[in-house]
Image (cartoon, grey):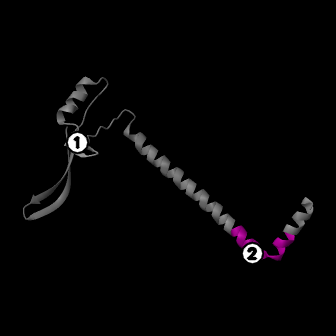
Amino acid sequence: MKVSETMRIAWEAILKNKIRSFLTMLGIIIGVAAVIIMVAISAGTEAAIQEQITSLGSNLLFVQSSFSRGGPGGGGGSGGLVYDDSTAIEEEIDGVAAVVVEQNSSQTVKAGTVQLDEVDIVGSSP
């Protein structure tokens, strides 16, 4: 079969089935548009997250302690950083400009007759 004959048959089929052709074309257009929109949303979200991370600064380092150490067989001994470690980090490591210690807790807060349970409290060094 020649290419010109194949194109002629395809064109005739499209003209005979106008509604089917239109709906097929519409489905392809909607599908492509949906993919383009999803890629754009993904790229925008990625850029926003990158901007937030960059706004923190490139010279910041966050160190968090682990509250428990375990493994096979239990061994749930406590470990991690203590307050004196922050002083040691600031004094012993070159290039450290400042160290801030932060402690999170959830407590019951009472003022007069009002009591709030499970209030998140964050304490920080100056």
In this image, 82 relative to 34: left or right?
Answer: left
Q: Which mark is residue 102?
A: 1
Please provide the residue range marked out in magenta: 11-26
Q: Residue at x 26, y 31 (%)?
A: 98
Q: Residue at x 7, y 62 (%)?
A: 112
Q: Is residue 36 above or below residue 58?
A: below
Q: Which mark is residue 18?
A: none
The image position of residue 105, as x and y in percent, is 19, 50
Tell me what residue is drawn at x 25 percent, y 46 percent. Answer: 73
Question: Looking at the picture, which amino acid does disc 2 mark?
Answer: Arg
Identify the element where label 2 is drawn: helix
Asked whether disc 2 touches disc 1, contact meaning CB atoms under 8 Å apart, the reply is no
Tell me which corner region of the image, top left, top right, bottom left or bottom right, holds residue 69. Answer: top left
Mark 1 neighbour class, 10 Å CA radius: few under 14, some 14 to 19, many 20 or more: few
Three-letter code for the amino acid on which mark 1 is drawn: Glu
Residue at which label 2 appears? 20
All told, the count of numbered labels is: 2
Tell me what residue is drawn at x 88 percent, y 68 percent. 9
Q: Earlier in the sequence, mark 2 or mark 1?
A: 2
Q: CA distance from mark 2 to mark 1?
A: 65 Å
61 relative to 36 in the view: left or right: left
| Occupied quadrant, residue 111 | bottom left
Task: Work out whether residue 65 or residue 90 is closer to the camera in this orientation and state it.
Answer: 65
Q: Nearer the viewer, residue 57 or 22?
A: 22
Taking the image as shown, residue 107 lies to the left or right of residue 72, namely left
Residue 13 sits inside the magenta stretch: yes
Q: Residues within 10 Å of mark 2 (few under 14, many from 20)?
A: few
Quadrant of image for the C terminus: top left
